[in-house]
Image (tube, rainbow, N blue to C red):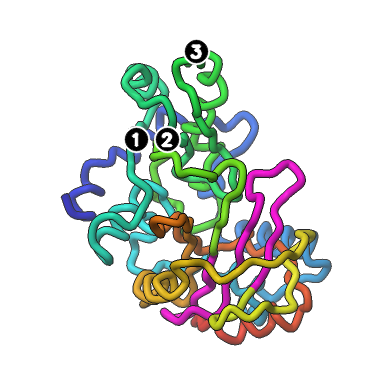
Amino acid sequence: MNLKQLLKKIPVIEEYAKRRDYEKKPDLRLLSLEEKKKALMDKYERKAGYRMDLEHPKTFTEKLQWYKLYYEGDGHLERLVDKYLMKEYVKEKLGEGHTIPLIGAWTNIKDLEKDWPNLPEEFCLKSTLQSEAKCIKFIHKKSSIEFKSLKKEVEQWFLFKNTLANSYCRAYTNALPRVLAEQYLENVKNQLFDYKLFCFDGKPFCAYVAQEHFSEKGSTITFYDMEWNKLDVQYGAHEVGDMPKPKHWEEMIEIAKKLSAGFPHIRVDFFDTDKKLYVAELTMYPGGGYTHYYPESFNEKMGDLFNITT
């Protein structure tokens, strides 16, 4: 089934109607363009300490705010950011076997509960429309878990208000909240080597590797250039470490070029194991454009590479 056929099978409007919960968070898509612009600039000012010009952004993080609000791409950006549809997109670009094997995907808690007895003992359960390691559970011994102990939490992942579909990020506007189960990768929970390549117009510029991604103390994040030279860059409050060049580094670069071609900016994220490299996800708005890069000149440099039309 190709992407066009897949999209036709998604009852987006009907599913949204069932899930919207406006008591705590309204449907942000109902805001006018001017209201969205003001909200984005207000939040950026709180995070960055100054008020940006949304119509004439300069730095990388400023341009990400513009990107969220205005960039339409090919009109089907959900195929990039939806962790379920992304697998189909990668398959079309690269062929079979480049994403983590899918066990199942569900659009409501009842169907997941019905299929629960048939799932393997070990797998990863995650929301398709969340980021920053939110809404992820590692199931290591399913037979020792009663589904009802997970149900209250996981059913929240299906709610429109709890997903990035209800945000200012245009790419998520037509995405359908789902939960999927993927094959569990060895060492993912205790030590995740997560490689993220920042690409501009199909050209990788730099990468960072995240260690201890799911640690309570937070990730260690270290930046490298395309020759794997360590860069003097800090991301937010994350500590900086050291990592040897990954086994599949050259393959990462070639894949990142193919997947990011035709887009002003995409971050291509990978999981690397001794045996195989996997495309983990495609990220259009790293950190929502709110996390600081130190020094600021690095934020400015990536802004220069980020070609948008305002």
Please, is residue 198 above or below residue 290 in the view? below
Which marked residue is nearer to the observer: mark 2 or mark 3?
A: 3
Which of marks 2 and 1 precedes in the sequence? Answer: 1
- The span picked out in magenta is 196-223
Work out whether residue 168 or residue 176 is closer to the camera in this orientation and state it.
176
Left or right of residue 105, residue 250 in this image = right
* Residue drawn at 33 percent across, 52 percent down: 87
Mark pair 1, 3: CA separation = 19 Å
Whether residue 275 appears in magenta in the rendering, the answer is no
Q: Residue at x 60, y 86 (%)?
A: 304
Mark 2–mark 3 distance (CA, rounded to whole Å): 18 Å
Instruction: Assess disc 1: are there few (<14), some (14-19) or many (≥20) residues with their C-alpha within 10 Å of its C-alpha.
Output: some
Q: Is residue 221 magenta?
A: yes
* Residue furthest right as drawn: 49
Residue 298 location in percent, x, y?
70, 80
Three-letter residue code for mark 2: Val
Q: Residues within 10 Å of mark 2 (few under 14, many from 20)?
A: many
Q: Residue at x 40, y 35 (%)?
A: 181
Q: Amino acid at mark 3?
A: Glu
Res. 310 in view: no
User: Mark 1 vs mark 3: which is more N-terminal?
Assistant: 1
The residue pinned by badge 3 equals 146
Q: Are marks 2 and 3 in contact (CB under 8 Å)?
A: no
Horizontally, residue 286 falls left or right of residue 172, namely: right
Q: Which of the two discs, 2 and 3, labels the residue nearer the N terminus?
A: 3
To which residue does mark 1 refer? 105
Assign the magenta stretch its main secondary structure. strand
Residue 288 in picture, x, y percent from top left:
62, 59
Residue contact between numbered discs 1 and 2, judged by CB atoms under 8 Å: yes
On the image, numbered disc 2 is attached to which residue?
179
Q: Residue at x 37, y 20 (%)?
A: 116
